[in-house]
Amino acid sequence: MMFSRRSLLAVSMTAPLAAPALAQGAWPNKPVRVLVGFPPGGSLDVMTRLAAEQMSQRLGQSFVVETRSGASGNIAAEALARATPDGYTIGTVSMHTVVINPMVFPSVPFDAARDFQWISAMWDLPNVFAVPAQHVPARTVQEFVAWGRERRGGVSFGSSGTGTTIHLSGAYFLARAGIQGVHVPFRGAAQTIPAMLGGDVQLAIDNLASYMGVIQNGTMRALAVTMPERWPALPEVPTMAEAGVPDFNVSPWHMWAGPAGMPREIAEKLSAEIRVAWADPALQQRAIGMGARLTGSTPAELAARLDREKPRWAEMVRISGAQAG
């Protein structure tokens, strides 16, 4: 079979374009790093390892979790933004890091709009409106509002640090309820809970997984969850909307992202694999037992969700006056 000179030239011109497509199609052909911006053992680390385990099984390559904790997730986000965009470095990124941190830190070492390739939403972590049973008589959110308004000096609310979603949620609730409040930052629930049980702090809108034990033993009372639906492990606890506080779905959530320039085909492939894995009812129940609700999304859906959430969190930052050093 004879080829014309023009045909041979056409083949030679298209060959360089075919090579990257073939390389992308082979992904992953070596281990993938998954950066995490918070310490080992926490909910973010545990859920990331669950996701890495699932992707390793589905794609036939190791997904290796690597901790880069500090600065409210900024250190890991910077490392992700500067990574080689070849699909072999991705990261579990908190909504807090890319939406709230740029609003409360004087500067952050990344540009959320420019430096990342979004992959998929991963999971939501429910927050619970918790009060110490021995020190707060309220059994509903509305009873707490009435009690808090009448309390001399108002109430103190705890959080895991200035500018966190927990801080902003508490300040936002008290402002909407017309209750005078004092923010008391701690280093996490391990410090907040003893302060509440000691009567020094009357309220926290904090991660449910950290409070399940003290709720179940009766020393802490759950008045509501900040999710659109009731939480399966606490079916008797109403949502904030059911408790009379509409538009208060303010639970933290997390996503997977890569550095800008990561091939879109890889992001789409990984997103599709995540959504298939997350559809498994047994895995969904496993996640609920770990205090999370699996989500999943396309890259475009993730970008749209981030855009929707920015105005609300900006308003909460304004109300709280949060500024991180």
Image (cartoon, rainbow, N blue to C red):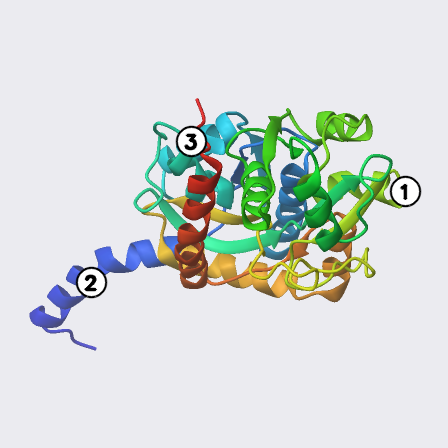
> Mark 2 falls on what kind of element?
helix
Asked which secondary structure carries label 1, the reply is loop
The residue lying at 69 percent from left, 51 percent from top is 292
Q: Residue at x 38, y 37 (%)?
A: 102
Q: Residue at x 61, y 53 (%)?
A: 123
| Residue visible at 61% across and 65% down in the picture | 276
**Which class describes the residues within 10 Å of circle 2: few (<14), some (14-19), or many (20+)?**
few
Amino acid type indicated by mark 1 = Gly
The circle on residue 79 is 3
**Which amino acid, by three-letter code, is at mark 3?**
Ala
Residue 314 image point, x, y percent: 41, 46
Asked whether residue 94 is in view, the answer is no
As drawn, which residue projects farthest toward the bottom?
A: 1
Task: Say which quarter of the image contains residue 114.
Answer: top left
The Cα atoms of the two marked residues, 2 and 3, are separated by 35 Å
Badge 1 is on which residue? 218
